[in-house]
């Protein structure tokens, strides 16, 4: 029996594959099972095309057996088998795929769903084996063949004996070392787990003799204590029919719920289930779930987004991050496609047009389902939004607002007039005819925002205000800029679109005659503010802070509390005074009689405005002393 050498490039590819391409040795079992499934498929489709009788789909199976003493693991199928030429072409040349060739030859048959496409998976067996032996007999042939290889040095092919058609792949498992445990691949419990993890939805039964324990007959009574004996039983390890390939009419809500809880280790039912089947440019089945609450690690760096990715029922990737945008990272579930392009192995996914097509369609589907939930079950949507709304808002902020069109219809904020969460569309629908902007105000809580002096003018005009309580809220609206042509405008902005109407001739006259007073107050604050001005927005409050420029007071607070922010960010603060408030009259009188006291009042009013905004007072001791001095005059 002559030993044949692999081609030089095949030797390099085999060495690279064993040591580099696959990151987890355990996937060799997945690859070999998928190849066995393909071999059965080929024979089954041949029987249909050639009207071969005596072949029943129910008779097909894949067998796994272990011999610990001989350190062998054997996978057997009763599929189409291979002849000498097949062995030479498919196993003698690495990356030559018989499955791919078969699929091309039968391209007209849309029912053909072959898993293996790139003839490399078989060689993953060398990651765990010192030697691989293949004994195979083609269907309808009298001859059987044996292919054997110990790795990159070459292989041999010779005629042998075998009962029945199909293929046996016998792996001689490597001895364990201090660094590597290969014994696990001779452990039936471990093998069961790998089948369940990677090949649970292979459409043919995967069978293995499993050792079990049972009580001996006649024991377990008062007279005779229980005694147990070991026995073996052939067991089917895979479920074969994936739930996502079943017709939705066959499934009940509890079927989805039980699958979700078992698959994703959650004790709570999902809030929403999305079962989607798509054909055409991107053909796939998707089963997605919106959890009822965030996973415990959702807001940590350890959390990994992504969907399980299957190719024709075979798990390719446990978390395919490319299938989900960050703003939908809370979605859990899986996608199964027979059209994915794979390069060298199933594990190394090529991020090609096909995968992007699936991702784009999933994004649209998730948005559509969430929007439907918002319209049909407001209470359930608000439950979802309280759990994951923050993620949507970060999505609206990220990438300079590039995802605005996807997310703007899903966002909700508390309304000053409705006293509940509302959508931007609902706000816009209620806008007054003369209203220019969508108004918002920021603060720690709804209650604190509701008492802000800056909101008084807007409320006086009957304008609805969105109350923003999350750190990201204002950043998101700034990035979005507008909603359906209506610009977002902070209640603290200089221009609210109603200032001119609010500033009467009397106010303008007071500002003109008080120029020196306002200048003195600005000087007294020693660069803490960029301006001191009279305001038309205040009604009952004597003072408030606003900001000129792109950084608002709320943004200043958020940016300066972020870890590792480094240099402190500062908004261009403006101290606004109410010209109709008694405090302003006091300031005018003091300006004429006691200019030094005006400086004290300027600092008092500035600190008062800081407290209203929830900003820290720079010198609490001086503030306290100023109040005491004022009280004891």
Image (cartoon, rainbow, N blue to C red):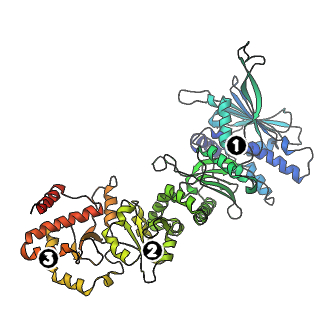
Q: Position of residue 295 (x, y in %)?
A: 52, 48
Task: Label 3, secondary structure: give it.
Answer: helix
Secondary-structure class at tag 2: strand
Q: Dot 2 corresponds to which residue?
A: 482
Q: Position of residue 45 (x, y in %)?
A: 84, 51
Q: Which residue is mark 1?
A: 200
Q: Residue furthest front?
A: 632
Q: CA distance from mark 2 to mark 3?
A: 41 Å
Residue at image coords 57%, 64% = 374
In front of the other: 225 or 417: 417
- Tell me if I can see residue 155 in this picture: yes
Q: Of residues 174 and 332, which is closer to you in this image?
A: 332
**Image quarter (top left, top right, bottom left or bottom right) of the C terminus:** bottom left
Instruction: Point out residue 503 in the picture as x, y percentages from the top left corner.
Output: 28, 83
| Residue that numbered label 3 is attached to | 588
| Circle 1 Cα neighbour tier, 10 Å, few/some/many (<14 / 14–19 / ≥20) | many
521 relative to 167, above or below? below
Query: Label 1's element?
Result: loop
N-terminal-most mark, 2 or 1:
1
Instruction: Kindly identify the residue that appears in the image at 68 percent across and 42 percent down.
Output: 30
Q: Residues within 10 Å of mark 2 (few under 14, many from 20)?
A: some
Q: Earlier in the sequence, mark 2 or mark 3?
A: 2
Foreground mark, 3 or 1, reads 3
């Amino acid at each position: 029996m002559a030993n044949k050498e692999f081609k030089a490039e095949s030797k390099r590819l085999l060495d690279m594959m064993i040591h580099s391409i696959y990151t987890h040795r355990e996937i060799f079992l997945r690859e070999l099972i998928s190849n066995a499934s393909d071999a059965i498929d080929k024979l089954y489709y041949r029987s249909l095309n050639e009207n071969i009788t005596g072949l029943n789909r129910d008779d097909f199976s894949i067998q796994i057996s272990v011999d610990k003493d001989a350190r062998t693991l054997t996978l057997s199928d009763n599929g189409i088998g291979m002849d000498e030429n097949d062995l030479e072409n498919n196993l003698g040349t690495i990356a030559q795929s018989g499955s791919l060739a078969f699929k091309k030859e039968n391209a007209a048959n849309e029912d053909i769903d072959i898993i293996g496409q790139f003839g490399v998976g078989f060689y993953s067996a060398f990651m765990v084996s010192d030697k691989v032996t293949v004994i195979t007999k083609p269907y309808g042939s009298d001859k059987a063949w044996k292919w054997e290889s110990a790795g990159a040095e070459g292989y041999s092919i010779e005629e042998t004996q075998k009962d029945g058609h199909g293929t046996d792949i016998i792996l001689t498992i490597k001895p364990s070392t201090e660094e590597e445990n290969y014994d696990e691949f001779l452990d039936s419990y471990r093998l069961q787990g790998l089948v369940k993890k990677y090949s649970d939805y292979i459409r043919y039964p995967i069978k293995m003799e499993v050792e079990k324990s049972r009580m001996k007959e006649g024991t377990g009574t008062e007279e005779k204590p229980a005694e147990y004996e070991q026995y073996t039983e052939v067991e089917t390890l895979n479920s074969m029919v994936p739930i996502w390939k079943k017709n939705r009419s066959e499934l009940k809500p509890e079927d989805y719920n039980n699958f979700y809880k078992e698959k994703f280790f959650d004790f709570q039912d999902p809030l929403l289930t999305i079962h989607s089947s798509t054909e055409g440019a991107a053909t796939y089945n998707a089963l997605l779930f919106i959890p009822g609450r965030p996973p415990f690690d959702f807001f940590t760096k350890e959390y990994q987004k992504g969907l399980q990715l299957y190719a024709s029922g075979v798990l390719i990737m446990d978390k395919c991050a490319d299938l989900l945008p960050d703003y939908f990272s809370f979605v859990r579930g899986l996608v199964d496609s027979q059209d994915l392009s794979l390069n060298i192995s199933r594990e190394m996914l090529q991020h090609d047009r096909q995968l992007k097509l699936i991702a784009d369609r999933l994004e649209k589907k998730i948005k559509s389902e969430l929007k439907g939930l918002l319209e049909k079950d407001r209470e359930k949507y608000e439950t979802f939004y309280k759990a994951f709304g923050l993620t949507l808002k970060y999505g609206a902020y990220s990438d300079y607002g590039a995802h605005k069109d996807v997310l703007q219809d899903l966002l909700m904020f508390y309304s000053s007039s409705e006293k509940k969460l509302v959508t931007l569309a609902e706000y816009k629908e209620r806008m007054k005819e003369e209203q220019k902007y969508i108004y918002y105000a920021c603060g720690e809580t709804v209650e604190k925002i509701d008492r802000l002096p800056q909101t008084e003018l807007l409320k006086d005009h009957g304008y609805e205000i969105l109350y923003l309580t999350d750190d990201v809220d204002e950043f998101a609206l700034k990035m979005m800029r507008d909603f359906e042509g209506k610009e977002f405008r902070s209640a603290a902005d200089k221009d609210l679109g109603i200032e001119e109407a609010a500033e009467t001739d009397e106010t303008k006259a007071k500002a003109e005659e008080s120029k020196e007073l306002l200048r003195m107050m600005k000087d007294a604050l020693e660069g803490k503010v960029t301006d001191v001005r009279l305001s038309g927005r205040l009604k009952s409050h004597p003072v408030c802070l606003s900001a000129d420029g792109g950084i608002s007071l709320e943004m200043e607070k958020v940016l300066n509390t972020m870890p590792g922010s480094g240099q402190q960010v500062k908004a261009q603060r403006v101290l606004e005074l109410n010209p109709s408030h008694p405090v302003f009259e006091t300031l005018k009188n003091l300006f004429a009689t006691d200019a030094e006291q005006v400086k004290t009042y300027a600092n008092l009013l500035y600190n008062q405005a800081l407290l209203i905004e929830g900003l820290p007072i720079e010198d609490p001791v001086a503030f306290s002393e100023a109040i005491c001095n004022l009280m004891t005059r």
